[in-house]
Amino acid sequence: MKKIKLFTTVLYVMTAAELLGAWNNAPQVKETAAFQEVNLSLEAEEENLLAAQEIQAKIKYANRMACETEKSHENQVIENQADKEEWERLMAEMKKEKEKRKKKKREERAILERIVEAEAGDQDVKGRVLVANVILNRVKSKRFPNTVKGVVFAHRQFSPIRNGSYYRVSVSNKTKEAVRLALKGTDYSCGALYFMCRSASAPSNVAWFDCALTKVKEYGCHEFFK
């Protein structure tokens, strides 16, 4: 009987000790749970902050790229405008040069027509072509000026310039046709660089032609030499 009472007493003491330990540990358990909740809250807040910072960084980068793209577009527009202006300037210069050349050709043609009319206005088309041939042969030769104007107005070369008939003639359609043919390549001259009308020339000029030059052709009233 005494043994049973002793066992009961020991069991009671152990149970009381366990209950007392559990009671003493209860605040510690609560504190641990609360600490864990605080840590979880801090971690979540830190993750949210990092996410917000990442979003802000992405927005800032996107804005910078948009600005750079806009600047690049503006620069490209400026470059394209500069290219366009340069192209337009070159086209204007080319047009101006083209018009200048056309004007010069018209002037050269008018001079050629007038000298042919003055020198061979009484000849047929072939006779007029021959006179035009001589003028053009001189333009091509290194011994004479390289323009029709330079050849025709060279000192003491063509009598119509000296006597003024060059300025008084009216150019006929027959002469215009002869000049057109000569400019297109019709050539009967055999390379002649000189011509004369023997009956209308001074004896000294005739002698010079006969002695200093080689006669290559005779047509109408003109003799042709080189």
Image (cartoon, helix red, strand yellow):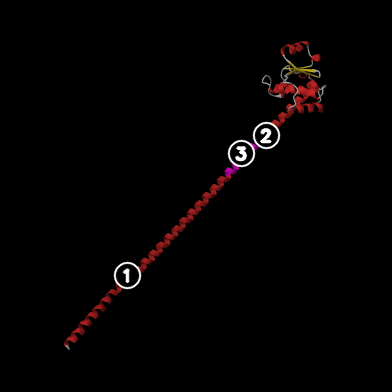
Q: Amino acid at mark 1?
A: Thr
Name of the residue lying farthest toward the right: 122
Residues under numbered marks 2 and 3 in contact, where contact means CB atoms less than 8 Å apart: no
- Label 2 sits on a secondary structure element that is helix
| Residue 216, image x, y percentages | 74, 17
**Residue 86 falls inside the magenta stretch:** yes
Distance from disc 2 to disc 1, alpha carbons, whole Å, reads: 95 Å
Q: Nearer the viewer, residue 196 or 101?
A: 196
Q: Are marks 2 and 1 in contact (CB under 8 Å)?
A: no
Residue matched to label 3: 86
Counting residues from the start of the chain, the first of labels 2 and 3 encountered is 3
Amino acid type at mark 3: Glu
Q: Judging from the image, what secondary structure is the residue with disc 1 in?
A: helix
To which residue does mark 1 refer? 32
Which residue does the numbered mark 2 point to in the structure image? 96
Residue placed furthest toward the bottom: 1
Callout 3: SS: helix
In the image, residue 200 above or below residue 10? above
Question: Of the residues tagged 1 and 3, which is closer to the observer?
Answer: 3
For marks 2 and 1, the one nearer the N-term is 1
Residue 11 visible in the displayed image: yes
Quarter of the image where one finds residue 207: top right
Residue at screen point 52% across, 50% down: 67
Region rendered in magenta: 78-92
Residue 155's disc is none
Q: Quadrant of residue 83?
A: top right
Sort mark 2 into few (<14), some (14-19) or many (20+) by Cα contacts within 10 Å.
few
Q: Residue at x 47, y 56 (%)?
A: 58
**Mark 1 to mark 3 CA distance (whole Å):** 80 Å
